[in-house]
Image (tube, rainbow, N blue to C red):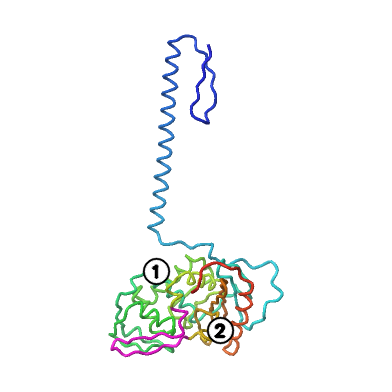
Amino acid sequence: MLGTSRLGENAERYEICVPSPHLTDTMSLLFRFSAAALSLVLSACSAGQSARMAGAMNNAYSRPAAYQPGFDVGAEPMFAASNVPAIRAASYLLIDAGNGKLLASKSSETARGVASTQKIVTALVVLDAGDLDKTVTVQASDIRVEPTTLGLRAGERYTRRHLLYAFLVKSANDVANVLARDNAGSISAFAAKMNAKLRSLGCSNSNFKNPHGLTASGQYSTARDMGRLAMAAYQNPIIRDIVRRPYYTFRRSDGRTVTLKNTNMLLGAMPECNGMKTGYTVAAGRCLISTASSRGKNVILIQLGTKTKYIWDDARTLMTWGLQRAKSGGVAMN
C-alpha cells in the first residue's frame, strides 16, 4: 500500500510503503511530530534573526551618525571637461551638491593651508555636542588671539548658539577659542576632536591644530577633503541658516548691539550664492568655500590659494558654469 504526505507548500513529495494499519498510525504520528519540530526550528531561527535585527537597530541608534559615502566627493573624471572656465586658484574643486559628483577640479589632492575655511569643522564639532542654549563664560585665555576678533572680554556670558552665529558670520578668532575651550577644555583637546571628525567624514589628507585656521606647523588639508567637509555642513540646517546671512546682530552681555557683516562678499552680489565660508592668511592665501542654488540645482566650490582680486569673480564664473551642468534635486538650500 502506498501513502503520501506534504510538509508545507514547498516540501518535497515522499512515497512511503505502509505494510499495516498499525504502522500507518505510527507513521502518521511521526509525520505530525516532524512537522511540529520543523515549525519550532523555523520559529527559533526567525526569533533569533529578529533579535539580531533589533540588537543592530538599538546599536545603530546608540552610536553617532556614521559618515555617509553617498555624500562623498565623486572621483576624478577620466577625461576633464574641455569647456571649464579658467580660474586662478592654486587648488579648486567644484561639485554637484545634490549627489557629490565632481564637475571640475585642479590639484584637488594637494595639501595646503586652508585658513578660516576650517572653521566649518569647528562648527560641526560644536553642533555634535548640542545644547546650543547653554551659557558659556569667556575666559582671559580665550581672547589672546589676533587678528580678527569680536572684542570679547573675560567674564562675559553668551549662549553657544549666539557665539556660533557670530563666529561663522564674522569669522572671529576669539569666539573660536571660547567655543573650543567650552567644548573640550583646551585648544589641543578640541583639535583632537576636529581631527576625529575629519576621519569620520572620510578626510584622510587633513590635520588641524586649532579651531580658527591661523597658520600652525603641521596644519593642512586639500580641496577634496574640504569638499567632503562642505558636503557635511551642507546637510546641516543650522549651518545653512548661519552662512546664508549677509548680516547678524550680535547682542553683547551689557545689552549693546553690533551688526556683523558676513565676510562672504558674494552674498547679495550673486543672487544664487547662499553660503559658506571665507579664509585668509599670508601662508594660505585667499580661500573660499561657496555654495549656489538655482532652479533645484546646487553646487559647492572650494577655492584654495588664490588672491582677493580674483576670488569673487572666479567663484561667480565657475559656480554659474556648474549650475548649468548640475542635476536637479538633492538637498535644498533655502
Q: Residue 88 carries which label?
A: none
Left or right of 188, for residue 75: right
* x and y, in percent, of residue 43 in the image: 41, 36
**Chain part drawn in magenta:** 242-262
The residues bearing labels 1 and 2 have C-alpha atoms spaced at a distance of 31 Å
Q: Who is closer to the viewer here, 118 or 270?
A: 270
* x and y, in percent, of residue 38 in the image: 44, 30
239, above or below 169, in the image: above
Left or right of 33, for residue 110: right
Q: What element carries label 1?
A: helix
Q: Is residue 245 magenta?
A: yes
Circle 2 crowding by C-alpha within 10 Å: few under 14, some 14–19, many from 20: some
Residue 86 figure quarter: bottom right
Residue lying at 39% horizontally and 49% vertically, measured from the top left:
55
63, above or below 106, in the image: above
* x and y, in percent, of residue 298 in the image: 56, 72
Residue 327 figure quarter: bottom right
Of the two numbered discs 1 and 2 on the same chain, state the one appearing first in sequence: 1
Q: What element carries label 2?
A: loop
Labels 1 and 2 touching (C-beta < 8 A): no
- The residue tagged 2 is 270
237, above or below 251, in the image: above
Circle 1 crowding by C-alpha within 10 Å: few under 14, some 14–19, many from 20: few
Q: Which amino acid does label 2 sit on?
A: Met
Q: Residue 128 carries which label?
A: 1
* x and y, in percent, of residue 256 in the image: 31, 90
Q: Which amino acid does label 1 sit on?
A: Asp
